[in-house]
Amino acid sequence: MKTARKFLRNGLGVIGAVIILALIVVALFAPQIAPFDPNAQDYNKVMMPPGGEHLFGTDDLGRDIFSRVVYGARISIQAALISVGIAMLIGVPIGLLSGYYRGFWDEWVVMRSVDAMQAFPFLILALAISAVLGSGFGNAMLAIGIGFAPAFIRITRGQVLSLRNMEYIQAARSVGVKDARIIFRHILPNALNPIVIQATLAMASGIIAEASLSYLGLGVQPPTPSWGSMLNQAQTLMSVAPYATFYPGIAIFLVVLGFNLLGDGLQQVLDPRSRK
């Protein structure tokens, strides 16, 4: 409760939480919110401007843009959760084991691999992995998750290094507590705060990465509505129908802003170094 009250006093963090909550509601109730089938084509209503029964207008195939933006929220929330989930499943266990046992495995295998992966810009790395795996939403999520994993390895390892020699850990070792219990029962719970903060911020990057890969044709495949693929399909219409790119673009902006504000708010609450 004390943590919740502190978070509620952080105005920007609350705004971020409201935006993300709105995203989740839109994604869950898309069939009830969207007035049209997002893939339904009506060639009698091609490129209609916003207004009337088509709130955001229609695209070059006569599809309702508002409905497609609403259904695109589902892809974005899946992108945020799945990509970060994959990254945590890879990064957190490796970081725990590497930081706890140290030695050759830690210094020359794990950290050198992490350094090599982080030498590439994240989006370039995800693009390269996705190009190798092939197009499709599942492969895009795997590529983004692998690209995120080094950050979680480094953060988790750093937390373990700061905790492994604490007095309560040494006391647990002295009474014969097994390493697995020490790692997962005593170290991991005390290392979760920065991992949660990183996960929240990574979700924003995951949405941008998914939109970028879909824009390039390596993510969600048509006709499934995705904000990135909508931008790709509408780029040739910018001179005659700029609204076709504006609405998916502003949706990406608002959701990424929401995750960043939420992450900053959680950092203010959970990270002792950020507390005033």
Image: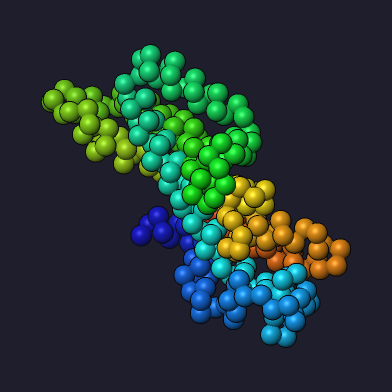
On screen, residue 19 versus residue 193, left or right, reads right
Q: Residue furthest front?
A: 43
Which residue: 54% across, 24% down? 115
Total numbered labels: 0
On screen, residue 167 versus residue 82, left or right, reads left
Residue 190 spot, x, y in % from top left = 33, 39
Which quadrant is home to the N terminus? bottom left
Q: Which residue lies furthest to the right in this view?
A: 239
Which residue: 31% across, 21% down? 101
Which residue: 40% across, 55% down? 3
**Residue 267 in sight here:** no
Residue 126 spot, x, y in % from top left = 58, 39
In the depicted view, which residue is nearer to us: 38 or 145? 38
Q: Is residue 107 above or below residue 53?
A: above
Q: Which residue lies furthest to the left in this view?
A: 175
Which residue: 69% across, 78% down? 42
Residue 165 spot, x, y in % from top left = 31, 23
Residue 221 spot, x, y in % from top left = 59, 56
**Residue 49 in sight here:** yes
